Image (tube, helix red, strand yellow):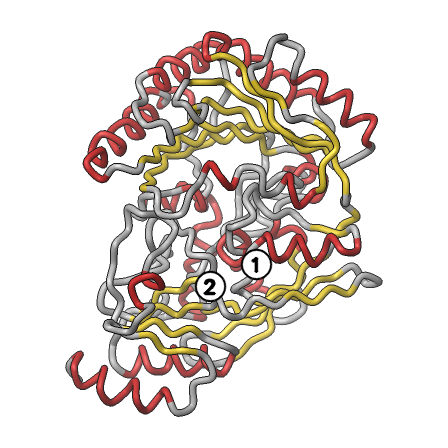
Amino acid sequence: MNSAAYAGEAISALSGRFAGRLIQPGDSDYESLRRVHNGLIDRRPALIARCAGVADVIATVALARAHGLEIALRGGGHSLAGRSTVDGGIVLDLSLMRGVIVDPLARIARAHAGATWGIFDRETQVYGLATTGGTMSTTGIAGLTLGGGMGWLMGRCGLTIDSLQSVQIVTADGRVLHASDAEHPDLFWALRGGGGNFGVVTTFEYRLHSIGPTVMGGLVAYPFARARDVLRLYRDLVREGPDELSIVGALLHAPDGAKLAGLGMCHCGDLEDGRRAAERLTSLGSPVMQTLGPMAYVDVNSMLDAAFPKGALNYWKSSFLRELSDDGIAILVESFASSRSPLSMIILEYLHGQAVRVAPDATAFPHRQPEVNMLVLSQWSDPTYTDQGIAWARETWGSMASFVRPAAYVNYQSETGRDVVVASYGGNYARLQKVKAAYDPENVFHLNHNIMI
């Protein structure tokens, strides 16, 4: 069936039994709804199926398969590589499915796949409960979870997947499965880090932890002239810090464009211990900005949102460091000095605590040793800067080649080739291929960091 016949007949047939909304080119909100967070991605799907429930998901998958159309899965729309949209295919959009139900006695939350972490945190914090949910409130729970889920709480609570208890998933053949340690355990293993390769996850069930509602958090920034000192301080603090303390190191820009070196923190334990940790962040003296203090956890998990505006153009390179040495710090500082976009950053996150007390093969996410993840985050607003923005990220990442190991956090990858996927899954890749062959042998779900079979 050609695209015109598809649009005229198949969509009409689907619309009569579709509870959500079907958006096509020419509809008044098509232009706004086809956009994703990364402005570098500009694609025009033939249909945006805004599903209202599982039946809509099943119908959309069946429609796409019947007509040979590619399926892009969209939760929060933050896929850096643009895999949550497609030219000429179907975007299966889950953003209308965003309910979160909390059982405070059992300390469990069931959340639909279209929820963002802002929505999730707001509901769970009513009861002083949370689970690791990244470092931004606008990120969708689905993409972050399926990629592993690093975040402010990972030292105390582990990665997001370490608190995942079960999922509901629609497979390529239209089955609705419940996957957990007890049911389809091979699939459940793969979904904890293996991304959207295996089907459409519609519901996540998480174990919750007693967090907040007040924690110690905030940001401190120093003049760029102190950048080497700041990153050395960061290195010392993360090596010594307790599980409850997560610190992000950053080279970034002030609102006026001036380059800065900064530290962000969340201490989710005793507030007095948190105050002492905050004092260490200001120990270099004379910061140009400081917001450290008792904060609501929902505010900590949204304090970086403004640094990632929707529609900005993004290209990221990321790897785990063998070590954060003085020589490596010097290269990072020198490389950031050459950045011309005031939106660009270099970010360091330390994988630690409960996140590294899990065996590398216990979940699909294999990176389970204490180490720093380096993110070269090139971000800009002027499309004419695109070539320079991409080149700066690649050159900076390349300059650190001798300090990184061949390992990557899949959620931070702008590239989608096999080398990136293998680096993301390491020794777990072969097992993931077997699960892929069992649940999606025709590779229907391939618009992702794809596991080839």
State the residue at coordinates (39%, 70%).
92
What quarter of the picture does the N terminus occupy?
bottom left
Quickly name the residue at label 1.
Answer: 189
The reply, left or right, for residue 119 in relation to residue 245 is: left
Q: CA distance from mark 1 to mark 2?
A: 9 Å
- Tell whether label 2 touches label 1 (CB within 8 Å): yes
Q: Is residue 205 above or below residue 14?
A: above
Q: Residue 299 is drawn in which quadrant?
A: top right
Q: Position of residue 32 (x, y in %)?
A: 34, 61
Determine whether the residue tagged by mark 1 lies in a helix, strand or loop: helix
Number of other residues with Cα within 10 Å of mark 2, as a class: few under 14, some 14 to 19, many 20 or more: many
State the residue at coordinates (42%, 28%).
345
Q: Position of residue 169 (x, y in %)?
A: 53, 71
Disc 2 marks a residue whose amino acid type is Val
Say which of 380 and 277 sits in front: 380
Q: Position of residue 240 (x, y in %)?
A: 69, 20
Can you tell which mark lies on residue 208?
A: none
Q: Position of residue 450 (x, y in %)?
A: 36, 56
State the residue at coordinates (38%, 45%).
422
